[in-house]
Amino acid sequence: MNAIQCYAPTNERDEDSKDQFYSRLQTIVESCPGRDFTIMMGHFNAKIGNDNTGWEEVMGCHGLGDINDNGKRFADLCASHNLVIGGSIFPHKRIHQATWVSPDQTTENQIDHLCINKKFRRSLQDVRVKRRADVASDHRLVVEMLKLRKNWTGDQIH
Protein backbone atom coordinates (compact mmCIF):
# COMPACT_ATOMS: atom_id res chain seq x y z
CA MET A 1 0.00 0.00 0.00
CA ASN A 2 1.20 3.49 -0.85
CA ALA A 3 -0.16 6.65 0.79
CA ILE A 4 0.63 10.03 -0.74
CA GLN A 5 -0.32 13.17 1.18
CA CYS A 6 -0.18 16.50 -0.72
CA TYR A 7 -0.50 20.22 -0.26
CA ALA A 8 -0.67 21.94 -3.66
CA PRO A 9 -0.05 25.59 -4.51
CA THR A 10 -3.14 27.77 -4.77
CA ASN A 11 -4.71 28.43 -8.16
CA GLU A 12 -3.37 32.02 -8.06
CA ARG A 13 0.28 30.95 -7.75
CA ASP A 14 2.58 31.34 -10.74
CA GLU A 15 2.71 28.63 -13.41
CA ASP A 16 6.29 27.64 -12.50
CA SER A 17 5.30 26.80 -8.91
CA LYS A 18 2.39 24.69 -10.09
CA ASP A 19 4.49 22.99 -12.80
CA GLN A 20 7.16 22.15 -10.22
CA PHE A 21 4.59 20.72 -7.77
CA TYR A 22 2.87 18.53 -10.38
CA SER A 23 6.20 17.38 -11.83
CA ARG A 24 7.38 16.28 -8.40
CA LEU A 25 4.02 14.64 -7.63
CA GLN A 26 4.14 12.78 -10.95
CA THR A 27 7.59 11.41 -10.05
CA ILE A 28 6.26 10.20 -6.69
CA VAL A 29 3.17 8.54 -8.22
CA GLU A 30 5.33 6.86 -10.90
CA SER A 31 7.52 5.36 -8.17
CA CYS A 32 4.53 3.42 -6.75
CA PRO A 33 4.27 -0.12 -8.16
CA GLY A 34 1.15 -0.51 -10.32
CA ARG A 35 0.04 -3.66 -8.53
CA ASP A 36 -0.02 -1.89 -5.13
CA PHE A 37 -3.02 -0.16 -3.63
CA THR A 38 -2.27 3.58 -3.80
CA ILE A 39 -4.22 6.32 -2.09
CA MET A 40 -3.40 9.94 -2.89
CA MET A 41 -5.00 12.56 -0.69
CA GLY A 42 -4.68 16.13 0.32
CA HIS A 43 -5.35 19.78 -0.14
CA PHE A 44 -4.94 20.11 -3.91
CA ASN A 45 -6.56 23.57 -4.24
CA ALA A 46 -8.23 21.94 -7.23
CA LYS A 47 -11.86 22.53 -8.14
CA ILE A 48 -12.91 19.68 -10.43
CA GLY A 49 -16.56 20.63 -10.89
CA ASN A 50 -19.33 18.41 -12.19
CA ASP A 51 -18.48 18.38 -15.91
CA ASN A 52 -16.29 15.31 -16.37
CA THR A 53 -16.05 15.60 -20.17
CA GLY A 54 -12.68 14.16 -21.16
CA TRP A 55 -12.08 12.73 -17.70
CA GLU A 56 -14.93 10.20 -17.52
CA GLU A 57 -12.49 7.42 -16.59
CA VAL A 58 -11.13 9.22 -13.52
CA MET A 59 -13.97 11.28 -12.14
CA GLY A 60 -17.71 11.25 -11.82
CA CYS A 61 -20.16 14.07 -12.39
CA HIS A 62 -20.81 14.86 -8.72
CA GLY A 63 -18.08 17.40 -8.08
CA LEU A 64 -18.87 20.83 -6.69
CA GLY A 65 -18.60 24.06 -8.69
CA ASP A 66 -16.66 24.63 -11.91
CA ILE A 67 -13.23 23.28 -12.79
CA ASN A 68 -10.24 25.62 -12.38
CA ASP A 69 -6.65 25.44 -13.68
CA ASN A 70 -5.49 23.36 -10.71
CA GLY A 71 -8.49 21.09 -11.27
CA LYS A 72 -7.43 20.47 -14.87
CA ARG A 73 -3.86 19.72 -13.81
CA PHE A 74 -5.11 17.41 -11.06
CA ALA A 75 -7.53 15.56 -13.36
CA ASP A 76 -4.81 15.17 -16.02
CA LEU A 77 -2.40 13.72 -13.45
CA CYS A 78 -5.05 11.27 -12.25
CA ALA A 79 -5.88 10.27 -15.84
CA SER A 80 -2.24 9.64 -16.74
CA HIS A 81 -1.80 7.37 -13.70
CA ASN A 82 -5.20 5.62 -13.61
CA LEU A 83 -6.32 7.22 -10.37
CA VAL A 84 -10.00 7.79 -9.57
CA ILE A 85 -11.13 10.99 -7.78
CA GLY A 86 -13.43 9.63 -5.10
CA GLY A 87 -15.32 12.78 -4.10
CA SER A 88 -16.77 13.17 -7.58
CA ILE A 89 -18.30 9.71 -7.84
CA PHE A 90 -20.99 9.67 -5.18
CA PRO A 91 -24.01 11.99 -5.20
CA HIS A 92 -24.29 13.92 -1.93
CA LYS A 93 -25.88 17.09 -0.69
CA ARG A 94 -23.69 20.17 -0.98
CA ILE A 95 -23.01 20.08 2.77
CA HIS A 96 -21.31 16.71 2.32
CA GLN A 97 -19.22 17.88 -0.65
CA ALA A 98 -17.71 21.22 0.41
CA THR A 99 -14.27 20.60 1.90
CA TRP A 100 -13.49 24.27 2.58
CA VAL A 101 -15.68 27.13 3.78
CA SER A 102 -14.64 30.77 3.86
CA PRO A 103 -14.41 32.46 7.27
CA ASP A 104 -17.58 34.48 6.55
CA GLN A 105 -19.39 31.25 5.57
CA THR A 106 -20.34 32.63 2.12
CA THR A 107 -18.06 30.56 -0.11
CA GLU A 108 -17.78 26.78 -0.24
CA ASN A 109 -15.37 24.80 -2.38
CA GLN A 110 -14.42 21.18 -2.94
CA ILE A 111 -10.62 21.50 -3.07
CA ASP A 112 -9.47 18.57 -0.91
CA HIS A 113 -9.53 15.17 -2.57
CA LEU A 114 -8.96 11.45 -2.08
CA CYS A 115 -7.92 9.27 -5.01
CA ILE A 116 -7.26 5.56 -5.43
CA ASN A 117 -6.06 3.32 -8.26
CA LYS A 118 -8.75 2.71 -10.84
CA LYS A 119 -8.36 -1.05 -10.50
CA PHE A 120 -9.53 -0.77 -6.87
CA ARG A 121 -12.55 1.41 -7.79
CA ARG A 122 -15.03 -1.32 -6.83
CA SER A 123 -13.62 -1.27 -3.29
CA LEU A 124 -14.64 2.38 -2.90
CA GLN A 125 -17.93 2.52 -0.99
CA ASP A 126 -18.30 6.26 -0.37
CA VAL A 127 -16.46 9.57 -0.03
CA ARG A 128 -18.02 12.42 1.91
CA VAL A 129 -17.31 15.38 4.13
CA LYS A 130 -17.92 15.15 7.88
CA ARG A 131 -18.89 18.70 8.86
CA ARG A 132 -18.95 18.35 12.59
CA ALA A 133 -15.49 16.83 13.02
CA ASP A 134 -13.34 19.22 15.04
CA VAL A 135 -10.17 19.46 12.99
CA ALA A 136 -9.18 23.02 14.05
CA SER A 137 -9.15 24.23 10.45
CA ASP A 138 -11.30 26.01 7.88
CA HIS A 139 -11.17 22.72 5.98
CA ARG A 140 -13.55 19.88 6.68
CA LEU A 141 -12.70 16.25 7.24
CA VAL A 142 -13.01 14.11 4.11
CA VAL A 143 -13.76 10.44 4.77
CA GLU A 144 -13.30 7.60 2.31
CA MET A 145 -14.98 4.27 2.99
CA LEU A 146 -13.33 1.23 1.44
CA LYS A 147 -14.13 -2.44 1.46
CA LEU A 148 -10.96 -4.28 0.53
CA ARG A 149 -11.12 -7.96 -0.27
CA LYS A 150 -8.59 -10.57 0.71
CA ASN A 151 -6.22 -11.82 -1.97
CA TRP A 152 -6.42 -15.55 -2.45
CA THR A 153 -3.61 -17.55 -4.01
CA GLY A 154 -4.45 -21.23 -3.94
CA ASP A 155 -5.48 -21.99 -0.36
CA GLN A 156 -3.49 -19.20 1.29
CA ILE A 157 -4.46 -15.68 2.26
CA HIS A 158 -1.87 -12.97 1.50
Image: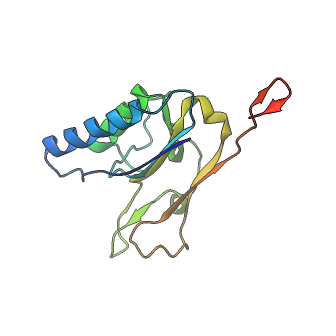
Q: Percent from the top left, x then y, of residue 89?
A: 56, 41
Tell me where residue 49 sits by quadrant.
top left
Q: Is residue 64 above or below residue 31?
A: below
The residue at the point 82 percent across, 31 percent down is 156
Please identify the quadrant where the N terminus is shown. Answer: top right
118 lies above or below 140: above
The structure residue drawn at horizontal position 14% and vertical position 41%, both measured from the top left corner, is: 16
Answer whether residue 63 is visible to the viewer in this image: no
**Residue 38 can be seen in this image:** yes
Q: What residue lies at 53% left-to-right and 44% top-to-bottom?
A: 86
Outermost residue on the right side: it is 155
Q: Quadrant of residue 23?
A: top left
Residue 112 x %, y %: 42, 54
Residue at the image position 78 percent from the left and 29 percent from the top: 152
Q: Is 112 drawn above or below residue 17 in the view shown? A: below
Q: Is residue 136 left or right of residue 117?
A: left
- Residue 157: quarter of image: top right
